[in-house]
Amino acid sequence: SPAIRLPASLFVVGHISRDSPGKEQKYMLGTDYQLTVKSLCASLLDSNVLVQRNNLEIVLFFFPFYTCLDSSERAIPLLRSDLVQILSAA
């Protein structure tokens, strides 16, 4: 829901450990990867700029661009269509 997006995004951004790669912290994204993609897309389309900024930070941390070249580096297994959907929402 829109009311919880800002606190949720602040929680995730605040608990990301910059010392560990996203692959080791994938538990923060949950186990239902399709729900993760839908949630990220909805948050990136939110009218609140702070929600958008926090979610862009999450996307860049957990889905860095070099993972398109090496799929073994991805935090969670995503299809090409999932990446296109996330980037289109951004």
Image: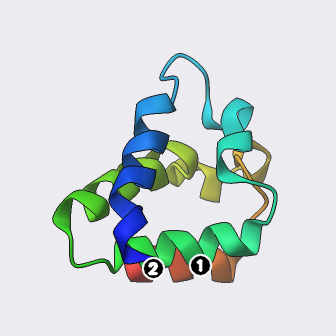
**In this rendering, would 6 be left or right of 16?**
left
Q: Are marks 2 and 1 in contact (CB under 8 Å)?
A: yes
Amino acid marked by disc 2:
Ala
- Quick one: 74 or 26, which is closer to the camera? 26
Q: Residue furthest front?
A: 3
**In this rendering, would 54 be left or right of 88?**
left
Question: How far across and down, in percent of the image, does residue 69 sit?
Answer: 65, 54
Q: How is the image coloured?
A: rainbow
**In this rendering, would 25 be left or right of 8?**
right
Q: Which residue is mark 2?
A: 42
Q: Secondary structure at mark 2?
A: helix
**Quarter of the rendering occupied by the C terminus:** bottom left
Q: Residue at x 39, y 58 (%)?
A: 55
- Quick one: 35 or 11, which is closer to the camera? 11
Q: Which residue is mark 1?
A: 38
**In this rendering, would 10 be left or right of 40?**
left
- Quick one: 60 or 31, which is closer to the camera? 31
